[in-house]
Amino acid sequence: MTELESFADIYRLVSQFSSEDAPAVAAWSAREPHLTKPAGSLGRLEQVTRHLAAWQGQHPPVLARLRAHVYAANHGVASLGVSAFPAAVTEQMVINFQNGGAAINQLCDLFGIALSVDALSLDRPTADFTRGPAMSENECVDAFATGMAATDDTMDLLILGEMGIGNTTSAAAVCLALFGGKAGDWTGRGTGVDDAQLRRKTEVVAAGVAKNGGEDPLVILQSLGGRELAAICGAVTGARLRKIPVLLDGYVCTAAAAILHAIRRDGLDHCLVGHVSAEPGHRRLLEKLGKQPLLDLDMRLGEASGAAAAVGLLKAALACHNGMATFAEAGVSGKDL
């Protein structure tokens, strides 16, 4: 793909986004009504298979080659008392991922998902965004390019997640800048902060948005995001350009992807959302994006865990659509017309 040097390069790529594949949708539409069940009786499972066919550009859709990509980064605002855990936990959890000890490892093993983890300059946290932009344009573009590089033509589905102490603060600030409202609308307890820490976190979110003005979505990402948010945004972009459907995880992951929605309203049409997290801002964000999550389990772990858990539903949907007999094949009488 094109080498990225500036935000202008990213905007050019996003302008090249294509729509869903019409022949694949037509093939799905020709099969689905003839399966041995009442029309619509599998509910959203039916729409999942349509989505996968439309964005893989093929029918039947497949889920043979699954990859979860987790991006990890550190945030300057973590030093402001916005998290219940120290910033050192980011690197410690990356090691845990690499050693197979985290929840995401177990879920990937269960559902046959290959896992990749990218630690993005953990020794260089982003700047404190209450004093100025979190990243330079070059830093933001570099992280975005790292995310784009995660996509290739061997994937049937890309599952995205993150790790970074302080990054729910960053996500809240990005959402406040993109969609407005009050800082408290978007700020939650994250890793489990107490009431005093929540008040402090909300103040930090408000201060960051006040300090970093402007409406340009990529400048918002640069100013209030983190390297892992920029990388997720890049991965979602790369997947769209390669006709790979995406499964988003929780609040931070969806906030990162929301940058593309702000650039163009159909920018996330190829994305499903694995779950809605316990972070109150996530449900509000999904409403803004017009996205309905697959699961609602009060999860708030991150690391792509909620999205990976939803892979079981996707596999169930494909098993039914691809494997069921039609009325004609089974010798079952169809609905009287």
Image (cartoon, rainbow, N blue to C red):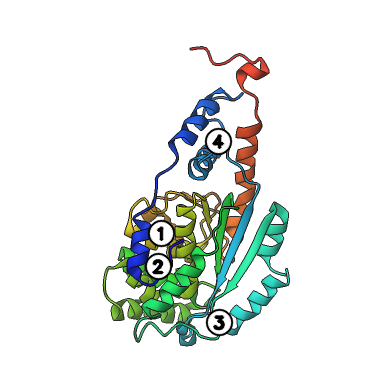
Give the residue pinned by disc 4: 59
Q: Give SS at disc 4.
A: loop
Q: Residue 214: x and y, percent?
A: 26, 72
Q: Amino acid at mark 2?
A: Trp
In this picture, residue 25 sits left or right of residue 184: right
Q: Residue 314: x and y, percent?
A: 60, 45
Numbered badge on residue 234: none
Q: Residues within 10 Å of mark 2 (few under 14, many from 20)?
A: many
Asked which quadrant contains residue 202, the reply is bottom left
Give the residue pinned by disc 2: 186
Between 209 and 63, the one nearer to me in the picture: 63
Q: Give SS at disc 2.
A: helix
Q: Residue 161: x and y, percent?
A: 55, 64
Return the disc, 2 or 3, that comes first in the chain's sequence. 3
Is disc 1 in contact with disc 2, using a CB cutoff of under 8 Å? Answer: yes
Q: Residues within 10 Å of mark 1 (few under 14, many from 20)?
A: many
Q: CA distance from mark 1 to mark 4?
A: 32 Å
Give the residue pinned by disc 3: 122
Numbered badge on residue 285: 1
Q: Amino acid at mark 3?
A: Leu
Between 105 and 184, the one nearer to me in the picture: 105
Q: Nearer the viewer, mark 3 or mark 1?
A: 3
- Residue at the (51%, 72%) spot, across then down: 190
Return the disc, 4 or 2, that comes first in the chain's sequence. 4
Q: Residue 39: x and y, percent?
A: 52, 26
Q: Is residue 188 visible?
A: no
Q: Nearer the viewer, mark 1 or mark 2?
A: 1
